[in-house]
Image (tube, rainbow, N blue to C red):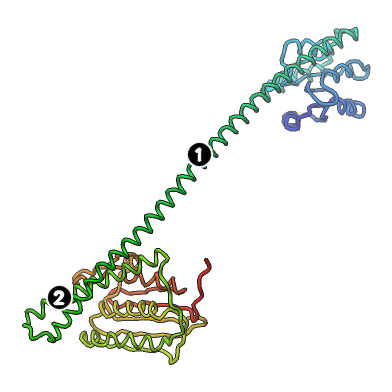
């Protein structure tokens, strides 16, 4: 049993074809009425299942053509449509000679049952094809035109409604877009003003810190100088109690001075107000100067200090700032090492130079490593007196290293010691603006 299915919708064709083939029928397909007529001229067809609304030739015209040809009029014709649902559409279809009029979507079982019923009647010779009830062409044309115009009017109304809704949606979208642009512009303005305000506050903060730091630094210098003179006995003899108390005053003043100096440096760096004095310098000599600075402190703690550096290691950088970082690294090594050795080493690697300071001190726990280069970060070790410090030394050292185009890193094993590495380029390159 061969069934011709006619539909311009490929999905519908595929669905019907799958359904019919699954029920054991042969299937031939066409995309419109004109294609269906071609198939009917060249192939043997037992049943026709057709949609109504199709391009080139619709289902109504196909039905009229089929029922008007003697060689085709006895083929059962079934309409299967989703668009023409009006009772008057079904009436026209039946008057044109259609045998069944099924509305989509029909349940697959229901559709197959109807087709099987038609097939049984055909096979048993009980099927009597319906004859067109409209014999006058004028009457056929009138009813066909009426249904077509009705459908076109409905389509036009649907299209007009869709266009209206789309216009409303576009207007709403445009309005929302315009409102969003206004809000974005307002927010951008607010953020710009807030940023300007923050920049001004930051500038004032830096100015205030620098000003206050200098004001605090000024009276500290004579305090440190005068206590030093008294401790040396230049102003006369002093008792041991007085020496002890004056030493405490001098140490506290030095600690405060170091804190103020670090704050000034940090403030200048963060405000981009620090000026570098780039020059050629002998790094080997500079490191030897730093080592000599700590000779007394190292001897007092009975530590060993080794220095390994090539002679004439010339680099182009800021001498004062490079020395400041190296002093901080050696100072920390001396401070946190009670016995053993501090090893200072410098070596050239490609276009860089690496200065490392390794100690056999208390070391740093793994979980505390992330705190090393943070502001005001001081790591306390249980059972050990909290060491004096500003908490800015390593933070400032990292800032200076970045400023000089270098870097600083640390590695440590708790209880065994630490190693800090300060890397500098052989030639300072000014960063692009």
Residue at screen point 34% across, 62% down:
207
- Residue 345's image quarter? bottom left
- Residue 275 image position (x, y, % from top left): 42, 72
Q: In the image, 88: left or right of 250?
A: right
Residue at screen point 40% across, 77% down:
422
Residue 2: mark in rendering: none
| Mark before the other along the chain sequence, 2 or 1 | 1
| Callout 2 crowding tier (Cα within 10 Å): few <14, some 14–19, many ≥20 | few
In the image, residue 399 above or below residue 116: below
**What residue sits right under mark 1 in the picture?**
183
Q: Is residue 397 visible?
A: yes
Q: In the image, 356: left or right of 305?
A: right
Residue at screen point 83% across, 18% down:
60
Looking at this view, is 76 or 7 the one in front?
A: 7
- Residue 280 image position (x, y, % from top left): 46, 84
**Identity of the residue furthest to the bottom in this view:** 311
Badges 2 and 1: C-beta atoms under 8 Å apart? no
| Callout 1 crowding tier (Cα within 10 Å): few <14, some 14–19, many ≥20 | few
- Residue 70 image position (x, y, % from top left): 93, 16
* Local SS, label 2: helix
Residue at screen point 53% across, 38% down:
182
* Local SS, label 1: helix
Q: Quadrant of the N terminus?
A: top right
In the image, residue 265 above or below residue 56: below
Looking at this view, is 69 or 357 the one in front?
A: 357
Residue 248: mark in rendering: 2
């Amino acid at each position: 049993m061969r069934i011709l299915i006619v539909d311009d919708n490929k999905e519908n064709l595929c669905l019907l074809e799958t359904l019919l083939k699954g029920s054991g029928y042969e299937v031939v397909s066409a995309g419109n009425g004109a294609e269906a007529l071609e198939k009917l001229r060249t192939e043997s067809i037992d049943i026709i299942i057709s949609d109504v609304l199709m391009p080139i030739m619709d289902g109504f015209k196909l039905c009229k053509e089929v029922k008007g040809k003697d060689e085709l009029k006895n083929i059962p014709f079934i309409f299967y449509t989703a668009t023409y649902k009006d009772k008057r559409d079904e009436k026209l279809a039946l008057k044109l000679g259609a045998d069944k009029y099924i509305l989509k979507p029909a349940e697959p079982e229901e559709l197959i049952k109807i087709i099987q019923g038609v097939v049984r009647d055909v096979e048993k010779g009980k099927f009597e094809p319906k004859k067109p009830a409209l014999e006058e062409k004028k009457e056929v044309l009138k009813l066909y035109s009426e249904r077509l115009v009705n459908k076109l009017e409905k389509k036009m109304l649907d299209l007009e409604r869709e266009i209206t809704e789309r216009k409303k949606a576009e207007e709403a979208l445009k309005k929302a877009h315009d409102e969003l642009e206004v809000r974005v512009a307002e927010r951008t303005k607010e953020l710009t003003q807030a940023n300007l305000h923050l920049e001004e506050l930051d500038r004032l903060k830096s100015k205030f810190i620098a000003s206050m730091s200098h004001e605090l630094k000024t009276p500290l210098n004579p305090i440190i100088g005068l206590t030093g003179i008294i401790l040396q006995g230049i102003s006369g003899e002093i008792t041991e109690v007085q020496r002890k108390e004056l030493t405490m005053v001098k140490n506290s003043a030095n600690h405060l001075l170091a804190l103020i100096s670090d704050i000034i440096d940090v403030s200048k760096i963060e405000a981009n107000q620090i000026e570098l004095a780039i020059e050629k310098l002998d790094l080997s000599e500079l490191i030897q100067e730093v080592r000599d600075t700590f000779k007394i402190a190292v001897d007092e703690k009975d530590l060993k200090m080794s220095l390994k550096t090539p002679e004439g290691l010339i680099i182009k950088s800021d001498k004062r700032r490079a020395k400041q970082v190296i002093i901080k690294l050696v100072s920390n090594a001396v401070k946190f090492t009670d016995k053993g050795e501090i090893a200072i080493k410098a070596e050239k690697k490609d276009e860089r130079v690496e200065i490392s300071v390794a100690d056999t001190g208390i070391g740093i726990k793994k979980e505390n490593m992330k705190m090393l280069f943070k502001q005001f970060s001081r790591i306390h070790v249980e059972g050990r007196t909290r060491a004096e410090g500003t908490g800015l030394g390593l933070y400032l050292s990292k800032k200076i290293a970045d400023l000089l185009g270098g870097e600083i890193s640390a590695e440590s094993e708790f209880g065994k010691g630490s190693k800090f590495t300060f890397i500098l380029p052989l030639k300072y390159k000014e960063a692009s603006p």
